[in-house]
Image (spheres, coloured by chain):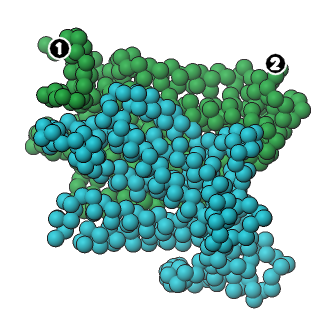
């Protein structure tokens, strides 16, 4: 319990850093985003509306500290301001439209990649210098060297455009209305194969190597030798004794990989015109929609922090030592 | 009198490591090729911005990689892009490690409250998702190589700091450092002549890894249009390919060569790194010696670590 609380404290701190960065970045930068912002609205909004806009962004003449406190109070209430490009929708509303897709895409990709990569790592270490161990790591490292979005472009070109096996973009067909129907879910799955597949292929190598290297070290340890000497079945030794312990560093890396994969999936979304955060983010950058851009950064950060905390829960379950030291 | 092997230091050690390991040799040759293209290539191909023909022509004898959506020669764009992207990649890779080392070594060496604060700092930066943060910062700054470099350093230094802190901490507890402290050496001297030389192989590995990161992240940001879109780099090539809907017009040649280059450079650097690891990692070295020993006796090595063989 103490372990979890300490981690929670850390994530709260990280969230506060993200909030603070979000507040100070626009104010530290050369040029004035506010001016650019208001230039876009000139003629479209009356002075009162402009003043209201200024206030929602906290760009008032009040001292910096009170601006900061106002901003924090707004953020805690879930008020991230108003989108410029989608005026007058609040940022949170715009983000909500794409959040589920990004979480679905990046989440599924990370979990699938972790599961397959780790299992391959176990196989590579167990059958050391077998064909899995000889060819797969190099091949996957090579594939992992490609930018995700470039693999996505190639997959889209070959499997989508040339062969026509998969749709060319979006999360579901235009002729379907979202709902809890089999047809809808099947269509979503069909649209997700390429984006998720490319991310999985690009990230598989890292999991494989991390698992393989830890596993090799653990296979040489005394308790594994003892398990073998006792004549336990090979599968039990490989999975329950070696793999479970070798999993710990990979699980630690999982939290960090999340942020990384999320970044990659933002780019992948753009290639597939997938209606997630990445697509919104690029639109926000192109339209100089600073409130939306910062809102997306904040929401993604909070999602990553929450996911990290869940990973800590798994870690606690996997490693009894953390539980014992806590009690 | 020192033994012969122990006297080989500095560049010679790395040179030897590259020669001895097949992966490292391969990586080094591939990387050298790209550096050569980056240095010499731009003089051999024409002006990448010149209009040389009809847009979106497939590869031909005249234009080996075809032409892009603006009627420019793709080969010239890739070659000129190699120079810019590699320069930014290596520069940023080095800067990322230097900054990470500064923080990490300071934290590991001085310990106590300094360590506590700096550790929290880099751990926080490790969990903040890098690309969204980079996008937000880059969007506020004027686009250009300097912005790109700054953004990549800000989002990439934390991992290096963490690794180098751990290594410094381990070295700090060793006897020779304790001896230097007792002998009254200054902190600066202990750091530069006792600790840093002993983690050189790690620093080199980190620099290579950071360069891979820098090239990948740079291409990603430029693909989003956050670089200088009028410059010719690998990332902007892909940005224009996407913008000109190269995919949906079937013009694969506008994006395929650039992506391959990014991957080949990344792969070369990774191979170089894993080759170095085989040489400098004592565990892998032991295993290699053991295998050689077994093979000399016509026996097949079965398990990774030399232990009593069993029945499987």
Instruction: From the viewer's side, name the closer residue of A93 and A65.
Output: A93
Which of the labelled discs sits on residue B3, or is there none?
A: 1
Disc 2, SS: loop
B67 left or right of B152 in image: right
Residue at the spot 62% in from the left edge and 32% down from the top edge:
B260
Q: Is residue A159 above or below residue A7?
A: above
A158 left or right of A135 in image: right
Q: Is residue B139 visible?
A: no
Which quadrant holds residue B195? top left
What is the quadrant of the C terminus of chain A in the image?
A: bottom left
Front label number (1 vs 2)? 2
Question: Chain B is which colour?
Answer: green
Per the image, the residue denoted by label 2 is: B61
Disc 1, SS: loop
> Which chain is cyan in the rendering?
A
Q: Disc 2: which chain? A: B
| Residue B191: percent from left, percent from top | 26, 41
Q: Is residue B205 above or below residue B221?
A: above
Instruction: From the viewer's side, name the closer residue of B302 and A67.
Output: B302
Mark positioned earlier in the residue sequence (1 or 2): 1
Which of the labelled discs sits on residue B303, or is there none?
A: none
- What is the crowding at mark 1: few (fewer than 14 residues within 10 Å), some, or many (at least 20)? few
Q: Is residue A140 visible?
A: yes
Extreme residue toward the right, this view: B54
Q: Report how far apart the C-alphas of labels 1 and 2 lie in the structure.
A: 58 Å
| Residue B135: percent from left, percent from top | 60, 57
- What is the crowding at mark 2: few (fewer than 14 residues within 10 Å), some, or many (at least 20)? few
| Residue A62: percent from left, percent from top | 57, 84
Q: Is residue A140 above or below residue B293?
A: below
Residue at the spot 66% in from the left edge and 42% down from the top edge:
A155
Residue at the spot 12% in from the left edge and 41% down from the top edge:
A230
């Amino acid at each position: 319990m103490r372990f979890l609380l300490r981690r929670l404290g850390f994530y709260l701190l990280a969230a506060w850093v993200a909030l603070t960065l979000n507040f100070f970045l626009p104010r530290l930068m050369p040029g004035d985003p506010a001016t650019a912002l208001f230039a876009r609205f000139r003629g479209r909004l009356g002075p009162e509306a402009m003043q209201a806009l200024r206030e929602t962004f906290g760009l008032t003449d009040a001292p910096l500290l009170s601006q900061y406190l106002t901003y924090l109070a707004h953020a805690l209430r879930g008020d991230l301001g108003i989108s410029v490009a989608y005026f007058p929708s609040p940022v949170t509303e715009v983000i909500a439209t794409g959040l589920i897709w990004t979480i679905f895409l990046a989440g599924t990709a990370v979990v699938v990649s972790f599961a397959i990569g780790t299992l391959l790592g176990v196989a590579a270490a167990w059958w050391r210098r077998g064909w899995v161990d000889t060819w797969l790591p190099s091949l996957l490292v090579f594939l992992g060297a490609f930018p995700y979005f470039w693999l996505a472009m190639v997959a889209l070109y070959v499997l989508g455009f040339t062969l026509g096996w998969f749709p060319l973009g979006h999360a579901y067909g235009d002729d379907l209305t979202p709902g809890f129907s089999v047809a809808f879910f099947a269509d979503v799955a069909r649209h997700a194969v390429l984006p998720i597949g490319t991310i999985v292929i690009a990230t598989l190598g890292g999991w494989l190597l991390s698992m393989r290297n830890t596993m090799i070290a653990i296979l040489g340890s005394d308790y594994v030798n003892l398990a073998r000497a006792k004549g336990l079945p090979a599968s039990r030794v490989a999975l329950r004794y070696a793999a479970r312990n070798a999993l710990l560093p990979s699980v630690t890396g999982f939290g960090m990989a999340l942020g990384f994969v999320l970044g990659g999936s933002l780019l992948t979304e753009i290639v597939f015109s997938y209606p997630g955060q990445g697509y919104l983010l690029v639109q926000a950058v192109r339209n100089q929609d600073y409130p939306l851009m910062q809102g997306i950064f904040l929401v993604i950060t909070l999602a990553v922090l929450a996911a990290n905390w869940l990973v800590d829960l798994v870690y606690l379950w996997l490693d009894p030592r953390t539980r014992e030291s806590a009690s | 009198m020192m033994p012969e092997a122990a006297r080989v230091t500095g560049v010679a050690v790395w040179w030897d490591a590259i020669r001895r390991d097949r992966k490292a040799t391969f990586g080094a040759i591939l990387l050298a090729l790209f550096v050569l293209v980056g240095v010499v290539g731009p003089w051999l191909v024409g002006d990448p911005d010149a209009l040389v023909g009809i847009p979106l022509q497939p590869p031909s004898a005249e234009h080996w990689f075809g032409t892009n959506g603006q009627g420019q020669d793709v080969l010239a764009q890739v070659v000129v892009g190699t120079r810019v992207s590699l320069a930014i990649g290596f520069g940023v890779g080095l800067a990322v490690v230097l900054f990470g080392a500064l923080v990490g070594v300071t934290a590991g060496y001085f310990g106590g409250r300094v360590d506590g604060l700096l550790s929290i700092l880099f751990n926080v930066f490790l969990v903040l998702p890098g690309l969204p943060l980079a996008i937000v910062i880059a969007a506020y700054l004027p686009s250009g190589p300097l912005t790109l470099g700054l953004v990549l350093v800000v989002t990439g230094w934390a991992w290096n700091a963490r690794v180098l802190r751990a290594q410094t901490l381990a070295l700090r507890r060793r006897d020779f450092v304790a001896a230097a402290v007792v002998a009254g050496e200054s902190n600066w001297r202990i750091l530069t002549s006792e600790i840093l030389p002993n983690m050189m192989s790690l620093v080199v590995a980190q620099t290579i890894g950071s360069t891979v990161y820098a090239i990948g992240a740079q291409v990603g940001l430029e693909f989003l249009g956050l670089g200088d879109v009028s410059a010719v780099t690998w990332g902007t090539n892909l940005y224009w390919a996407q913008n000109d809907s190269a995919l949906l017009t079937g013009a694969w040649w506008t994006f395929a060569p650039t992506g391959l280059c990014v991957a080949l450079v990344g792969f070369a650097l990774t191979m170089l790194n894993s080759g170095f690891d085989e040489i400098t990692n004592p565990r892998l070295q032991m295993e290699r010696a053991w295998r050689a020993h077994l093979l000399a006796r016509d026996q097949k090595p079965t398990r990774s670590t030399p232990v009593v063989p069993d029945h499987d």
